[in-house]
Image: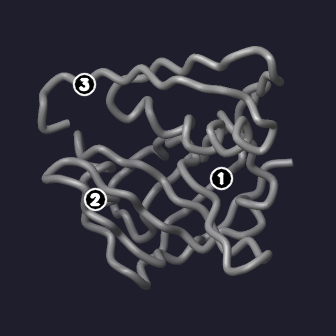
Amino acid sequence: MPLDVEAVVLGNRRLSSEYNVLELAAPAIAAGAEPGQFVMVKPTGATDPLLRRPLSVFEILRQGDRVTGLSLLNKRVGVSTARLFDAEPGDRIFCLGPLGRPFTPVDPPAEAWMVAGGVGLAPFALLAEALARRGTAMRLYYGARRAAD
Protein backbone atom coordinates (compact mmCIF):
# COMPACT_ATOMS: atom_id res chain seq x y z
CA MET A 1 0.00 0.00 0.00
CA PRO A 2 1.57 3.33 -1.01
CA LEU A 3 2.25 5.86 1.72
CA ASP A 4 2.45 9.65 1.40
CA VAL A 5 5.03 11.15 3.78
CA GLU A 6 6.98 14.33 4.27
CA ALA A 7 10.50 12.90 4.31
CA VAL A 8 13.48 14.67 5.82
CA VAL A 9 16.62 14.88 3.67
CA LEU A 10 19.38 12.95 5.44
CA GLY A 11 22.10 13.57 2.88
CA ASN A 12 22.85 14.71 -0.64
CA ARG A 13 25.87 13.16 -2.36
CA ARG A 14 26.93 14.98 -5.51
CA LEU A 15 28.23 12.55 -8.10
CA SER A 16 28.87 15.17 -10.80
CA SER A 17 27.65 18.59 -11.87
CA GLU A 18 24.34 17.00 -12.94
CA TYR A 19 23.85 13.82 -10.87
CA ASN A 20 23.29 13.35 -7.15
CA VAL A 21 22.06 10.73 -4.70
CA LEU A 22 19.43 12.10 -2.33
CA GLU A 23 18.97 10.22 0.96
CA LEU A 24 15.53 10.51 2.55
CA ALA A 25 14.21 9.47 5.96
CA ALA A 26 11.19 7.51 4.75
CA PRO A 27 11.52 4.17 6.56
CA ALA A 28 7.90 3.08 6.10
CA ILE A 29 8.13 3.52 2.33
CA ALA A 30 11.61 1.96 2.16
CA ALA A 31 10.54 -1.09 4.18
CA GLY A 32 7.91 -1.91 1.56
CA ALA A 33 9.95 -1.08 -1.54
CA GLU A 34 11.01 -3.85 -3.91
CA PRO A 35 13.47 -3.77 -6.83
CA GLY A 36 12.03 -1.82 -9.75
CA GLN A 37 9.61 0.31 -7.75
CA PHE A 38 9.60 4.11 -7.62
CA VAL A 39 8.38 7.07 -5.58
CA MET A 40 6.78 10.36 -6.61
CA VAL A 41 8.65 13.28 -5.02
CA LYS A 42 8.33 17.05 -4.74
CA PRO A 43 10.18 19.52 -2.52
CA THR A 44 7.94 21.02 0.17
CA GLY A 45 7.28 24.74 0.20
CA ALA A 46 7.13 25.02 -3.58
CA THR A 47 4.97 28.04 -4.39
CA ASP A 48 4.47 27.21 -8.04
CA PRO A 49 2.35 24.32 -9.32
CA LEU A 50 5.23 21.87 -9.75
CA LEU A 51 4.10 18.28 -10.13
CA ARG A 52 5.73 15.40 -8.33
CA ARG A 53 8.47 13.62 -10.23
CA PRO A 54 8.87 9.83 -10.45
CA LEU A 55 12.26 8.57 -9.28
CA SER A 56 13.29 4.94 -8.90
CA VAL A 57 14.29 3.71 -5.47
CA PHE A 58 18.08 3.46 -5.68
CA GLU A 59 19.05 2.09 -2.26
CA ILE A 60 17.39 1.04 0.99
CA LEU A 61 19.19 2.78 3.85
CA ARG A 62 19.83 0.72 6.97
CA GLN A 63 21.42 1.01 10.38
CA GLY A 64 22.11 -2.56 11.34
CA ASP A 65 18.87 -4.49 10.76
CA ARG A 66 16.69 -1.36 10.94
CA VAL A 67 15.46 0.33 7.74
CA THR A 68 15.97 4.10 8.07
CA GLY A 69 15.10 5.40 4.62
CA LEU A 70 15.83 5.27 0.93
CA SER A 71 17.98 6.98 -1.64
CA LEU A 72 17.17 8.31 -5.09
CA LEU A 73 19.47 8.83 -8.06
CA ASN A 74 18.60 12.23 -9.55
CA LYS A 75 19.72 14.10 -12.65
CA ARG A 76 19.31 17.87 -12.68
CA VAL A 77 17.23 18.57 -15.80
CA GLY A 78 14.41 21.00 -14.95
CA VAL A 79 13.02 23.06 -12.08
CA SER A 80 11.91 20.12 -9.90
CA THR A 81 15.04 18.01 -10.36
CA ALA A 82 17.20 21.13 -9.78
CA ARG A 83 15.48 21.63 -6.42
CA LEU A 84 16.16 18.00 -5.56
CA PHE A 85 19.78 18.44 -6.67
CA ASP A 86 20.14 21.47 -4.36
CA ALA A 87 18.36 19.92 -1.34
CA GLU A 88 20.21 20.10 1.95
CA PRO A 89 20.05 17.90 5.06
CA GLY A 90 16.99 18.86 7.08
CA ASP A 91 14.96 19.95 4.03
CA ARG A 92 11.66 18.18 3.52
CA ILE A 93 10.47 16.32 0.41
CA PHE A 94 6.96 15.02 -0.22
CA CYS A 95 7.37 11.32 -1.01
CA LEU A 96 4.62 8.97 -2.22
CA GLY A 97 5.33 5.28 -2.66
CA PRO A 98 6.36 2.64 -3.20
CA LEU A 99 4.66 2.58 -6.60
CA GLY A 100 4.89 0.44 -9.72
CA ARG A 101 5.25 -3.21 -10.48
CA PRO A 102 8.49 -4.65 -9.06
CA PHE A 103 10.98 -6.75 -11.00
CA THR A 104 10.89 -10.53 -10.62
CA PRO A 105 14.44 -11.69 -9.84
CA VAL A 106 15.52 -14.88 -11.58
CA ASP A 107 17.11 -17.83 -9.82
CA PRO A 108 20.23 -19.77 -10.77
CA PRO A 109 21.19 -21.25 -13.13
CA ALA A 110 19.71 -18.36 -15.12
CA GLU A 111 21.89 -15.28 -15.56
CA ALA A 112 20.35 -11.82 -15.23
CA TRP A 113 21.23 -9.24 -17.88
CA MET A 114 20.44 -5.67 -16.86
CA VAL A 115 20.46 -2.93 -19.51
CA ALA A 116 20.34 0.73 -18.49
CA GLY A 117 21.24 4.23 -19.56
CA GLY A 118 21.56 7.45 -17.57
CA VAL A 119 19.35 7.57 -14.48
CA GLY A 120 17.71 4.39 -15.78
CA LEU A 121 20.49 2.70 -13.81
CA ALA A 122 18.79 3.51 -10.49
CA PRO A 123 16.44 0.53 -10.06
CA PHE A 124 19.17 -2.00 -10.78
CA ALA A 125 21.02 -1.39 -7.49
CA LEU A 126 18.22 -3.05 -5.49
CA LEU A 127 17.78 -5.74 -8.14
CA ALA A 128 21.49 -6.56 -7.99
CA GLU A 129 21.23 -7.00 -4.21
CA ALA A 130 18.25 -9.34 -4.60
CA LEU A 131 20.03 -11.36 -7.30
CA ALA A 132 23.19 -11.63 -5.19
CA ARG A 133 21.16 -12.98 -2.24
CA ARG A 134 19.82 -15.69 -4.57
CA GLY A 135 23.28 -16.48 -5.93
CA THR A 136 22.23 -15.46 -9.46
CA ALA A 137 25.00 -14.44 -11.85
CA MET A 138 24.43 -11.03 -13.41
CA ARG A 139 25.74 -8.59 -15.99
CA LEU A 140 25.07 -4.88 -16.28
CA TYR A 141 25.20 -3.15 -19.66
CA TYR A 142 25.25 0.60 -19.13
CA GLY A 143 25.30 3.41 -21.64
CA ALA A 144 25.49 7.14 -21.26
CA ARG A 145 25.18 10.12 -23.52
CA ARG A 146 28.62 11.47 -22.56
CA ALA A 147 31.74 10.07 -20.92
CA ALA A 148 31.14 12.38 -17.90
CA ASP A 149 27.81 10.66 -17.28
Question: Mark 2, mark 3: which one is toward the viewer?
Answer: 3
- Residue depicted at x 48% and y 67%: 23
Which amino acid lies under the numbered mark 1 shown in the image of this protein? Leu
Q: Secondary structure at mark 1?
A: strand
Residue 18 as seen in the image, left or right of residue 64: left
Place of residue 144 in the rendered image (x, y in percent of width and height, measured from the top left): 24, 25
- Residue depicted at x 53% and y 77%: 8
Q: Residue most toward the right?
A: 1
Tag 1 near tag 3, CB within 8 Å:
no
Q: CA distance from mark 2 to mark 3?
A: 19 Å
Which amino acid lies under the numbered mark 2 shown in the image of this protein? Phe
Give the class, few, some or many, for how many residues have Cα within 10 Å of label 2's Cα (few <14, many ≥20).
many
83 up-or-down from 10: above or below: above
Tag 2 near tag 3, CB within 8 Å:
no
Place of residue 113 in the rendered image (x, y in percent of width and height, measured from the top left): 57, 17
Labelled disc at residue 31: none
Q: Which residue is mark 3?
A: 144
Give the class, few, some or many, for how many residues have Cα within 10 Å of label 3's Cα (few <14, many ≥20).
few
Q: Which residue is mark 2?
A: 85
Labelled disc at residue 96: 1
Q: Secondary structure at mark 2?
A: helix
Place of residue 91 in the rendered image (x, y in percent of width and height, measured from the top left): 41, 78
Question: Mark 2, mark 1: which one is toward the viewer?
Answer: 2
132 up-or-down from 81: above or below: above
The quadrant holding residue 60 is bottom right
Sequence-first disc among 2 and 1: 2
